[in-house]
Structure formats: C-alpha cells, structure tokens
Image (spheres, grey):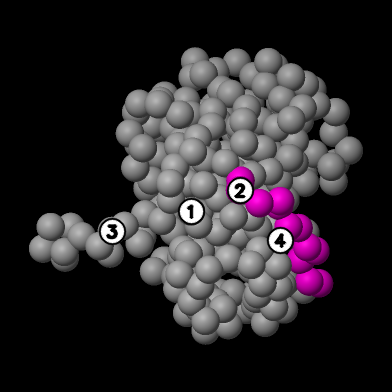
Amino acid sequence: MAQAVGIDIGGTGIKGALVDTTKGILLSDRIKMDTPKGGEPDDIVKVVVTIIEQLKVEKTLPVGVCFPAIVIDGKTMSAANVSHKWINFEAEKFFEKALGRDIRFVNDADAAGVGEVRYGAAKDVAGLVLMTTLGTGIGSALIYDGVLVPNAELGHIEVDGKDAETRASYAAKERGRLSFRSWAKRLQRYYSALEFLLSPNLFVVGGGVSKSYEEFLPLLKLRTKIVPATLRNNAGILGAAALAVDRVDAAKIPAAKR
Ligand code: BGC
C-alpha cells in the first residue's frame, strides 16, 4: 500500500487528508479550513502547515498540493480567481521551505482528473477523458490512456465571444440566478465547442454542483458520453496524493531509463 497526503486549495476552503493511493481512499478524516481572505501565498501556506500538523504524518510521506493556477515545474503562472501574487511564483519551493519537506504542486483540475481516472468515474476508460470542474471557474484536465496532459486551460476558451467560465461556471449560474434549464443552454454551447475541438471519449463533470447532475446533464445533447464525477469533493485530494507518489516513484528510476 502506498500512502501520501493530498491537499486541495480552493477559493473558499483548503482541504487535506491522508490517502491510500493504491486503493484511492482516504485513511484519515478530511480536515477543512477556510481559505484566508485575499488568498495570498503567506496566509495560505500557514493553513496548509496547520493541516499537515493535524494529520500527524511521517516526514517522509509524499505530499501533493493542488491549486487553481497553471503550474509549470512547481511555479504558478496564472491567477484566475486568486491573488495576483501567485503569478510567476515559485509555489512548490515556497511550500517546501515552509513545510520542511518535499512536495508536488499541481493544478487543481489536473489533480481532480487524475483522481477520477484512477479511482472514479473514468476508471479503465481508454482514449481521451476530458474532466471539467464547474465551480468558481471552470477547470479542465485532459487525460489520454491514463496519461495527463498537464495545464489544459479549457475553461478559458472563447464561446460566443466570451471567456467560457464567465458564462458557464457554477458561479456564473449563481451570479445570474439562472435556473438549471437556462444554465444548461450555456453548458450546451460550451460542451459542444469542446466536443468539436477535441472529440473526447468521455466527459466527466465535477465540482460541487455535480451532485445535482440529474438537473442538468440529461438536458445536454452531445454525441460524447457525459457523466458526473464520483469522487465529489475528494477528487483533488486523491489526485494530488497520487501525483505526489508518481513523482517519488519516478525519482527511483535511474535517469537513463526514464
Ligand atoms: C483556472 C484554472 C483552474 C480552474 C478551476 C480557472 O479559472 O484558470 O487553472 O483549474 O479555474 O479552479
């Protein structure tokens, strides 16, 4: 059994748990704390330190942290819906220093997608799985035959002349007080565009609202199968933990064989 800690940083909450990455289950209670106002790095890292202390895990255990930004080699490159201090920020190094241990820092939707592909709604699905998370923004993960193509930012494609997430995220539904039926019309435009551009084998729809999937998924007319995420709020935690273990495993292989 492989174990790791998964931490999921979001705009409103920061969640963490100890994970069995072989089975894809939580081995501890999920600890949840509020995201500090302003969402700045210094304040967020303090919360993550507290969560890891509360989990009382060994120092050697891999830790995966996921966050709503493009993350290249541990550096955050964007900041949609979070503090601008994260742009061009060495997030992974910053967290490693504060936590006194190695970590792996990844995009939140990538982590959720890896979670769903390994343990959830897209388990054993061959070909292209396109995970989307409908929340404050729209997150996306592209996974082909189980291999993640990191940092797809498909929440920001232009649909009807607008940034897609400003029209079709769950926050957009709330802002506009849209019924599920009206929101589904926007989702239809969005998923049709993705389907045309990428011809995936499966769409997985995550984010808190996916628990109400019966209200909107049946309204969508697509040739691609579209299913709700099954790991719900734990997808990011599970995926981040799995990606942290992958990094540790990859480091064990001599460079010449990688
Ligand atoms: C960000 C993505 C993130 C998504 C979900 C988008 O606004 O650009 O990086 O994955 O929100 O949090």
Quadrant into which the C terminus falls? bottom left
Q: Residues within 10 Å of mark 4 (few under 14, many from 20)?
A: many
Q: Is residue 163 above or below residue 177?
A: below
Q: Residues within 10 Å of mark 3 (few under 14, many from 20)?
A: few
Q: Earlier in the sequence, mark 1 or mark 3?
A: 1
Q: Label 4, label 1: how many angstroms apart (C-alpha)?
A: 20 Å
- The residue at 71%/73% (across/down) is 50
Residue 161 at x, y = what percent?
61, 44
Q: Earlier in the sequence, mark 2 or mark 3?
A: 2
Q: Label 2, label 1: how many angstroms apart (C-alpha)?
A: 9 Å
- Amino acid type, residue under disc 4 in the picture: Ile
Q: Is mark 2 within 8 Å of ligand 1?
A: no
As helix, strand or loop, the secondary structure at mark 1 comes to strand
> Mark 4 highlights which residue?
14
Please check the rendered image and state whether residue 242 is part of the magenta-colored stretch, yes or no.
no
Front residue of 255/54: it is 54
Mark sitting on residue 27 = 2
Which dot, 3 or 4, sits closer to the camera? 3
Q: Earlier in the sequence, mark 4 or mark 1?
A: 1
Residue 167 at x, y = what percent?
71, 42
In the image, which residues are magenta? 26-37
Q: From this viewpoint, which residue is outermost toward the left?
A: 256
Q: From this viewpoint, which residue is outermost toward the right?
A: 177
- Amino acid type, residue under disc 1 in the picture: Gln
> Mark 3 highlights which residue?
250
Q: Label 2, label 3: how many angstroms apart (C-alpha)?
A: 24 Å
- The residue at 64%/67% (across/down) is 56
- The residue at 52%/81% (across/down) is 100
